[in-house]
């Protein structure tokens, strides 16, 4: 039986990098080619498969529908090939990812699912960093980070992981004492618990409840979402937090006050440098995170 002809592997590499980086110029720089040389390699691949994979306009290259289908069909097999090579290589022992994670996201959403990632990619090991200023350290001391932000800085590859509502969370006893009513007279007597890095959540909640002119008895500031929930459960105040935090905490001591739905200014984002997606640890984690829907 005659052997099947292999696809042009350098052309396939050029195609995959262009898709993953979202830029032909960035892909050419990564591979060490001129843009015209990269374009020729992709043309060779198109001739091999008999399909137009990109549309070209000036310096821009956009995937066609056939190109998207080709990527989705080929990418899993390339991942399988890479894993097979890694499993047979004595030179690859560990793939190391330096990941910045907020403690609340880590405990509630990431760590309950990390076992799945370990089974899928046993060579991938993750150094966890929960220190402040995660976004600023991406590309320096961190390969990637999961941040809670109004929107990441330009120049980063970013994937939005959720949309949230702002809730006023307190103990069942406090809610019962207030009659579960968000009124001016009630709120003026309360202590509010606000996260240092999420002040706009309180602004949005007050505006939605027509309480912009109300001055509470006190505002206590925290740098830990977990401690905010515990403080609220102990009756120390009303925590302004995301609905997802309350749901995942599943703490029977806590409830949220009645009121209108308040869209949060903040979301969780996965961020890294665009070029970091070409490193295998970052790409493996990124692809798993998106598929897992954490």
Image (cartoon, rainbow, N blue to C red):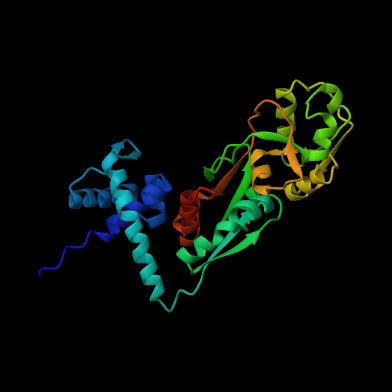
Q: Is residue 3 above or below residue 240?
A: below
Specify whether 31 is left or right of 259: left
Specify whether 59 is left or right of 284: left
Q: Nearer the viewer, residue 134 or 10?
A: 134
Q: Is residue 83 above or below residue 233?
A: below
Q: Residue at x 78, y 49 (%)?
A: 227
**Residue 206 quadrant:** top right
Q: Nearer the viewer, residue 21 or 258?
A: 258
As drawn, the residue found furthest toward the bottom would be 90
Q: Nearer the viewer, residue 284 or 218?
A: 218
Q: Is residue 260 above or below residue 276?
A: above
Q: Residue at x 44, y 77 (%)?
A: 91
Is residue 227 something that shows in the picture?
A: yes
Specify whether 119 is left or right of 209: left
Q: Position of residue 152 (x, y in %)?
A: 59, 41
Q: Residue at x 89, y 31 (%)?
A: 217
Viewport quadrant of the N terminus? bottom left
Q: Position of residue 265 (x, y in %)?
A: 64, 33
As drawn, the residue found furthest toward the left would be 1
Q: Position of residue 11 (x, y in %)?
A: 28, 55
Specify whether 290 is left or right of 35: right
């Amino acid at each position: 039986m005659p052997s099947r002809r292999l696809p042009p592997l350098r052309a396939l590499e050029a195609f995959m990098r262009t898709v993953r980086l979202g830029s032909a110029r960035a892909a050419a720089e990564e591979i060490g080619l001129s843009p015209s040389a990269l374009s020729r390699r992709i043309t060779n691949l198109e001739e091999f498969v008999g399909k137009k994979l990109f549309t070209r306009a000036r310096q821009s290259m956009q995937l066609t529908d056939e190109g998207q289908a080709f990527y989705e069909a080929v990418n899993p097999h390339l991942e399988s090939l890479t894993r097979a090579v890694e499993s047979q290589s004595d030179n690859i022992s560990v793939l190391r990812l330096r990941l910045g994670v907020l403690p609340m996201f880590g405990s509630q959403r990431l760590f309950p699912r990390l076992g799945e990632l370990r089974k899928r990619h046993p060579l991938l090991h993750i150094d966890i960093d929960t220190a402040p200023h995660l976004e600023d350290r991406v590309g320096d001391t961190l390969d990637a980070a999961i941040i809670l932000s109004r929107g990441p800085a330009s120049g980063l590859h970013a994937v939005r992981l959720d949309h949230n509502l702002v809730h006023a969370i307190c103990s069942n006893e406090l809610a019962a004492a207030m009659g579960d009513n968000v009124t001016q007279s009630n709120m003026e007597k309360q202590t509010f618990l606000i996260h240092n890095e999420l002040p706009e959540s309180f602004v949005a909640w007050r505006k939605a409840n027509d309480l912009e002119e109300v001055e509470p008895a006190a505002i206590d500031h925290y740098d830990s979402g977990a401690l905010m929930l515990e403080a609220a459960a102990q009756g120390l105040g009303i925590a302004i937090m995301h609905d997802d935090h309350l749901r995942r905490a599943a703490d029977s001591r806590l409830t949220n006050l009645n009121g209108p739905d308040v869209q949060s200014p903040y979301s969780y984002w996965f961020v890294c440098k665009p070029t970091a997606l070409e490193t295998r640890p970052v790409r493996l984690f990124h692809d798993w995170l998106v598929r897992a829907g954490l």
